[in-house]
C-alpha cells in the first residue's frame, strides 16, 4: 500500500507539468487570439498552388475559359 | 443552361465588392467592376498572383468608392516612432487597426503581404480585434509605403491621434486572472481527488493516509489562498479602511476562517478540514469575475476628439508643403485641407471654396458654404476641393475641443451602484450577527461547540452563490445584447439601464437615418420616366444622384448616351431616345428654392417638377417613441435648426421638451438639470457635440451605423440597425435585475439549509463540500436559463 504515496507524488508532478505548460502558453500570448488561428489553418493547401510555375496557372485559366 | 443563369446573375454585381454595377461597368479580364477603385485592387492582386483572395469567399472586397486619405504625415519621424510597437535600425513592428477586415479572405490576403514586397517580413492578423501586426525592414520600406500598400489593396488602416497619445493597452490583467483561475482549478481538482477517500470512509489502519492527504491538501490550499484569492483580501481590506462593506468582505472572511479551521483540524488530526470547499469557492468566484470582465477588445468606449481628428495636417510655409503633427500646430500656421479631410482647429478661410459638413460636430444636417475670411470651427469636413486656412487657436483650445476641459471629463464617472453592492452590506451584518448568536448560545456549555458553530456559520454562509448571481446573469444578458448589436461597456450598465426613467434623444444621425435620405417628389412622374431618371443619375458620382438612385430603387435598363456632368450643378444625357436634364434650379434655369436640396427634372424640354431630399426618421422611431413614452419621459435636444419641430411634436409629451440650436455645453447642462430633479437619464447621441451629454448622463448610448467608425466616449454603442429594439433592451435589463433578485432568494435558501447545520455545530466537511458546489451550479444554471427565457419573451433571441 505504500506504493500509493509514490503514485500520488507522480500524479501531482505530472499535473504540475501541465500547469506549467499552460503558464507558458498563456505568457507567450497563445491564448490571446482564439479565432484567427482556426481560420489560418485552412489556408495551407492553397499556398502550394501559388508556388506553381506561372505558365501552368495560365494554362489552367485557358482551360477554364474553354469549358465556359 | 444553369451555368449561364448563374453567370448572368453574378454579372450584375461588382466582382470585388458585390455592389450593383453601374450602366457602364469597369471591365478587367472577363470580370466587371463597379468603380475604378475595385478594379485596381483586382489588378494589383492578380499581378501578384494573389487571386485566391476571390476563391475563399464571393465578393470579399469592400467598396472602394470612398476617397482615400493621405499618409504623407507618416514620413514624419516623430509620428512614425510613436506609432511603432518596436523599432531598431533594421526592423519595425507596427500594429494597425483595419476596419475593413471582415472575412477569411481578408485574413489570407493580409497575411500574404510579403508577396507584394519582400521587405515585409511578417504580417499577422488578429481577426476579432481587426488588427494587423506587420514586421518590415525599415531600410527598404517606409511606414508610409506600408500604409499606402494596404490602402491600394482596399485595406486602409485607421490611424488617429489617440493611437499616438494613448499607448497600446495591454491585456495583461486578463492574462493574470486566467493564470489565477488555472492555479485555483488545478488545486481544486487535486484536492477533490485527495478528499474523496475520507468522505467514503477510511478504516482504522489507513489513518496514516488520512494525515498524508490532509497535509498535501494544506499545501494545495496555500497558493489558492495567497495567489488566487489574494484580490479578495486586498479589496475587503481597502474597502473596510474606507468604511465600506462590500461583498468581498464576507467572502474574504469565509476564505480566511475556512483556512484557519482547516489548518487547526489537520494539525490536531481532529478532522479533514474544508480545503476542497475553499478551493472550489475561489475557483468559481474567479470564473464569475472573468465573466464580468470580458469586454469587447475591438470596440473603444473611451474615445474623445483625438481619435476623430487626423494625426497630422498638411502645413504650407513659403510655398512648401509638409506634414505637421497636430499637437505642434500653433496660431498663425497656414494649413491645406483637401477634399474629405477634417479641419482640425478653428481657422480663417484664406483660399478656395469651402463647403463643410458639420453634421457630426453640431448636428446640423445641411452642408454649409463659407466665404473667404470667415471663421471655420474645428471638426467640419470639407466636401469640395482643397482649401487653405490660417489657424486661429491650437487644437486643444478650439470651440469644439474645449468641451473636454469641462469638469464632467476631469473626474471619473461615479461607479454604478449595483444590487450586489447594496445587498452585501446587510448580508454581512446579518451574517456576523448569526455567527455571534450561535457562539453565545453554546459558550456557557461547550467551548468547542461554540468555536465550531461560529466558524461553521462564517464558512457556510460565505456568499459564493450571491457573488455569482450578478456576473452570470449580466454576462448572459450582455451576450444577448451583443447578438442584437447593442454593445455595452460593462455589465454594470445593465443595472443602470433598468433604472432609466428619462430618455434624451439627439436628432441628426440619432433619430434620423444618415444613410437613407428620403426623396419627396413634387410634381408627377410615371414609372417609365422614373426609370429614365434613375438610369441617368446612375452615371453620376454626386451624393445626391447616388441617393436618388437608391431611393428610386429601380434596376438599370437603358444605356446613356451623350452623358454630360457639370460638377455640383447637374447632369444631362440621352436615355432611350429622350433628352433628360437633372439638377439644381440654376442648372435648369429656374429661380432658386429656399429650402433643402432639390433635384429638378426636365425631359425633352418639359418640366416635370422636382425631388426634394428630406430627413428620414429611423425605421420604427414612431413606435419606439410611443412605447417608451408610456414609462419614460422623452426629450429631444438638437444642435440643428428647428425646421423639423412640427413633425416631431406628436412624439413628445410637451413642446417644452424639444430643444433646438443647442451647443455641446448646453446639452451637457440640460442633462445636469434633469439629474438635479432626481431623474435617471439615458442619452442617445452620435456626434462629437453629444460627447458632454453622453458623459454626464447615467447611461450614454452612442448610435452609429458602422461600429468601426468613430463614436464618442460612451457607456454603450448601439448599431443603427437595432435602434427599434431599444424598448426591448430596456425591458430585458429590468428582467435581468429581476433574475438577480430571484437568484439572491435561491442562494439565501441554500444558506438557511447550511445554517441549520452550522448553528448546531454539526457542519461536517462533507455537507459543506456538497452544498457549496451545488448552490453554485444551481445559480449558474438558473441565471443563464432565466436570462435566455426573458430574452425570448422580449424577442431578442
Image (spheres, rainbow, N blue to C red):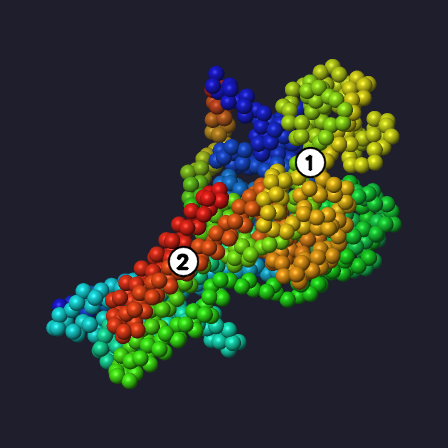
For the view shown, which residue lies furthest in the bottom direction?
B444
Q: Which residue does the image show at 75% across and 49% down from the upper left?
A: B660
Q: Which residue does the image show at 22% across and 78% down from the upper left?
A: B269
Image height of B548 relative to B483, above or below: above
Q: Position of residue B293 (x, y in %)?
A: 48, 59
| Residue bearing mark 2 | B743
Q: Which residue does the image show at 55% across and 21% down from the upper left?
A: B8
Observer-nearest of B522 and B677: B677
Residue B300: mark in rendering: none
- Answer with the quarter of the image where residue B302 lies: bottom right
- Name the secondary structure under disc 1: loop
Q: Position of residue A14 (x, y in %)?
A: 27, 62
Q: Is residue B755 left or right of residue B383?
A: left
- Tell me, yes or no, if residue B135 can be seen here: no
Q: Is residue B525 left or right of residue B62?
A: right
- Answer with the quarter of the image where residue B369 lies: top right
| Residue bearing mark 1 | B517
Amino acid at each position: 500500500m505504500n506504493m500509493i504515496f509514490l503514485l500520488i507524488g507522480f500524479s501531482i508532478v505530472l499535473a504540475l507539468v501541465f500547469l506549467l505548460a499552460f503558464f507558458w502558453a498563456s505568457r507567450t500570448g497563445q491564448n490571446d487570439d482564439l479565432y484567427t488561428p482556426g481560420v489560418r489553418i485552412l489556408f495551407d493547401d492553397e499556398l502550394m498552388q501559388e508556388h506553381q510555375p506561372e505558365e501552368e496557372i495560365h494554362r489552367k485559366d485557358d482551360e477554364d475559359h474553354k469549358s465556359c | 443552361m444553369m451555368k449561364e443563369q448563374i453567370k448572368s446573375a453574378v454579372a450584375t454585381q461588382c466582382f470585388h465588392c458585390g455592389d450593383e454595377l453601374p450602366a457602364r461597368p469597369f471591365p478587367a479580364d472577363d470580370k466587371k467592376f463597379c468603380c475604378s477603385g475595385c478594379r485596381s485592387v483586382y489588378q494589383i492582386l492578380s499581378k501578384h498572383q494573389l487571386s485566391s483572395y476571390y476563391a475563399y469567399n464571393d465578393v470579399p472586397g469592400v467598396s472602394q468608392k470612398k476617397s482615400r486619405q493621405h499618409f504623407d504625415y507618416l514620413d514624419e519621424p516623430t509620428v512614425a516612432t510613436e506609432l511603432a510597437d518596436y523599432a531598431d535600425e533594421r526592423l519595425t513592428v507596427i500594429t494597425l487597426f483595419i476596419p475593413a477586415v471582415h472575412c477569411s479572405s481578408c485574413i489570407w490576403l493580409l497575411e500574404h503581404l510579403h508577396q507584394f514586397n519582400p521587405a515585409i517580413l511578417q504580417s499577422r492578423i488578429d481577426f476579432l480585434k481587426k488588427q494587423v501586426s506587420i514586421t518590415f525592414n525599415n531600410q527598404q520600406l517606409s511606414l508610409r509605403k506600408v500604409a499606402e500598400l494596404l490602402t491600394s489593396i482596399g485595406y486602409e488602416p485607421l490611424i488617429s491621434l489617440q493611437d499616438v497619445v494613448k499607448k497600446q493597452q495591454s491585456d495583461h490583467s486578463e492574462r493574470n486572472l486566467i493564470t489565477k483561475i488555472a492555479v485555483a482549478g488545478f488545486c481544486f481538482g487535486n484536492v477533490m481527488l485527495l478528499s474523496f477517500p475520507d468522505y467514503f470512509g477510511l478504516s482504522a489502519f489507513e489513518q496514516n493516509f488520512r494525515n498524508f492527504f490532509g497535509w498535501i491538501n494544506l499545501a494545495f490550499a496555500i497558493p489558492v489562498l495567497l495567489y488566487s484569492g489574494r484580490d479578495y483580501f486586498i479589496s475587503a481590506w481597502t474597502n473596510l479602511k474606507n468604511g465600506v462593506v462590500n461583498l468581498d468582505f464576507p467572502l474574504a472572511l469565509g476564505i480566511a476562517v475556512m483556512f484557519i479551521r482547516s489548518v487547526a483540524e489537520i494539525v490536531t488530526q481532529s478532522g479533514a478540514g474544508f480545503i476542497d470547499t475553499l478551493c472550489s469557492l475561489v475557483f468559481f468566484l474567479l470564473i464569475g469575475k472573468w465573466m464580468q470582465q470580458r469586454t469587447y477588445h475591438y470596440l473603444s468606449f473611451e474615445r474623445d476628439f483625438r481619435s476623430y481628428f487626423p494625426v497630422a495636417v498638411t502645413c504650407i510655409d513659403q510655398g512648401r508643403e509638409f506634414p505637421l503633427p497636430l499637437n505642434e500646430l500653433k496660431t498663425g500656421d497656414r494649413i491645406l485641407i483637401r477634399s474629405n479631410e477634417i479641419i482640425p482647429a478653428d481657422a480663417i478661410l484664406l483660399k478656395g471654396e469651402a463647403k463643410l459638413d458639420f453634421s457630426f460636430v453640431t448636428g446640423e444636417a445641411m452642408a454649409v458654404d463659407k466665404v473667404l475670411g470667415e471663421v471655420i470651427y474645428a471638426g467640419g469636413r470639407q466636401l469640395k476641393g482643397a482649401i487653405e486656412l490660417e489657424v486661429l487657436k491650437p487644437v486643444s483650445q478650439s470651440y469644439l475641443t474645449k468641451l473636454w476641459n469641462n469638469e464632467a471629463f476631469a473626474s471619473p464617472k461615479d461607479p454604478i451602484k449595483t444590487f450586489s453592492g447594496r445587498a452585501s452590506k446587510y448580508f454581512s451584518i446579518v451574517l456576523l450577527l448569526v455567527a455571534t448568536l450561535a457562539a453565545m448560545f453554546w459558550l456557557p456549555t461547550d467551548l468547542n461547540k461554540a468555536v465550531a458553530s461560529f466558524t461553521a456559520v462564517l464558512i457556510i454562509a460565505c456568499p459564493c452563490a450571491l457573488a455569482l448571481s450578478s456576473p452570470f446573469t449580466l454576462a448572459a444578458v450582455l451576450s444577448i445584447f451583443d447578438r442584437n448589436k447593442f454593445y455595452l461597456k460593462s455589465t454594470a450598465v445593465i443595472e443602470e439601464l433598468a433604472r432609466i426613467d428619462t430618455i434624451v434623444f439627439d436628432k441628426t444621425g440619432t433619430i434620423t437615418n444618415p444613410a437613407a435620405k428620403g426623396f419627396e417628389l413634387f410634381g408627377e412622374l410615371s414609372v417609365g420616366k422614373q426609370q429614365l431618371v434613375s438610369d441617368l443619375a446612375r452615371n453620376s458620382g454626386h451624393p445626391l444622384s447616388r441617393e436618388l438612385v437608391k431611393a428610386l430603387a429601380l434596376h438599370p435598363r437603358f444605356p446613356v448616351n451623350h452623358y454630360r456632368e457639370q460638377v455640383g450643378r447637374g447632369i444631362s444625357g440621352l436615355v432611350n431616345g429622350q433628352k433628360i436634364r437633372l439638377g439644381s434650379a440654376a442648372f435648369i434655369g429656374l429661380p432658386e428654392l429656399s429650402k433643402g436640396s432639390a433635384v429638378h427634372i426636365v425631359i425633352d424640354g418639359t418640366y416635370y417638377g422636382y425631388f426634394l431630399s428630406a430627413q428620414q426618421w429611423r425605421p420604427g422611431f414612431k413606435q419606439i417613441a410611443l412605447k417608451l413614452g408610456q414609462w419614460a419621459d422623452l426629450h429631444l435636444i438638437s444642435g440643428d435648426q428647428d425646421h423639423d419641430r412640427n413633425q416631431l411634436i406628436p412624439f413628445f409629451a410637451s413642446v417644452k421638451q424639444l430643444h433646438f440650436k443647442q451647443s455641446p455645453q448646453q446639452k451637457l447642462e440640460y442633462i445636469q438639470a434633469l439629474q438635479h430633479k432626481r431623474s435617471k437619464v439615458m442619452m442617445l447621441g452620435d456626434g462629437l457635440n453629444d460627447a458632454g451629454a453622453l458623459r454626464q448622463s447615467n447611461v450614454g448610448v452612442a448610435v452609429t451605423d458602422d461600429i468601426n467608425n468613430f463614436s464618442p466616449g460612451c457607456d454603450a454603442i448601439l448599431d443603427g440597425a437595432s435602434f427599434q429594439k431599444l424598448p426591448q433592451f430596456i425591458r430585458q435589463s429590468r428582467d435581468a435585475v429581476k433574475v438577480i433578485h430571484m437568484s439572491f432568494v435561491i442562494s439565501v435558501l441554500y444558506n438557511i439549509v447550511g445554517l441549520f447545520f452550522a448553528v448546531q455545530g454539526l457542519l461536517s466537511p462533507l455537507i459543506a463540500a456538497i452544498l457549496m458546489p451545488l448552490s453554485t451550479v444551481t445559480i449558474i444554471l438558473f441565471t443563464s436559463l432565466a436570462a435566455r427565457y426573458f430574452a425570448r419573451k422580449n424577442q431578442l433571441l
